[in-house]
Amino acid sequence: MLKHITSLSMAALVSLTFLGNAQAASDAIELKSGHWKHGGIFGTYDRAAAQRGLQVYREVCAGCHGLALVAFRTLTDLGFSGEEVKAIAAQSDFLDGPDASGDMFERPGKPSDRFPSPFANEQSARASNGGAYPPDLSLITKARASGDDYVYSLLTGYGEAPEDIQMAEGMNYNAYFPGHQIAMPAPLSADAVEYSDGTPATVDQMAHDVTVFLTWAAEPKMEQRKNIGLKVILFLLVLAGIFYAVKRKVWSDLH
């Protein structure tokens, strides 16, 4: 798991937030599709997958990456009960205060808190990751077009380097990373987590689930947005029909 690997374990993922025109730099390798349930105008989040993805994030990714824009209380949108959210939040400690004596103190997390950063500050993060600053994952799937496909592809794209690629020391081959050389070792391995619902924890499954969770984290109101959009379209269609009927009535005497 990421929180147990070397200091370079998550460094290269920072590149996700500085991709720019990386689509063209991916050597024309087509990204894998996760066949997302949330895709399309009628798409909705797969909540079971998102809940499993939260488990992958907490047990694998949270050692290096925060979710600074995501409050624990919003997990109720994924189907967690209020008591479950309280329990999840309480597993993180937060510095608070000052108290009546003017001292800072640690307290268990509350639903109103946001996911904590694994590092006290940027300097500490860089020192632990070979100089790179691990990005916050709150909006990581928004960092580029087809961000969900990219994250899913990256997490499952590790393998042996082709003979015609000379790998730099300490780098790992990834078919979907721009340049194909990434400092982060493969973060997922079979059975890296034990899913509470009994789903087999294959690399592909974990990559899929954590991508669903991160997509939700980046756009938690997507379903509401799509619902409003559909209502607006239906309203405009009905209005267009009424206007057409009125036009036919007004101009009927001229035929």
Image: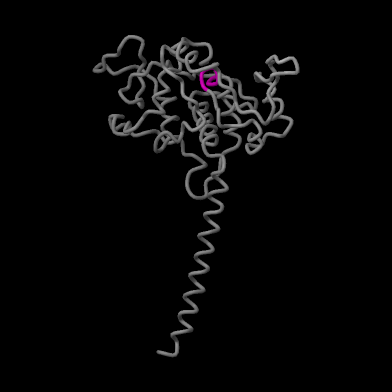
Which contiguous range is marked in magenta? 60-65
Left or right position of 117 against 248 = right
Left or right position of 80 against 185 = right
Figure quadrant of the C terminus: bottom left
- The secondary structure that dominates the magenta segment is loop
What is the x, y in percent for residue 248? 46, 81
**Residue located 31% across and 31% down the image:** 29
What is the x, y in percent for residue 135? 46, 24
**Residue located 52% across and 46% down the image:** 43
| Towards the viewer: 204 or 71 | 71
| Towards the viewer: 64 or 164 | 64
Q: Residue furthest left?
A: 164
Left or right position of 81 against 143 = right
What is the x, y in percent for residue 70? 58, 32
| Towards the viewer: 227 or 126 | 126
Relative height, residue 241 to residue 37 (above, below): below
**Residue located 34% across and 24% down the image:** 175
Q: Residue furthest right?
A: 100
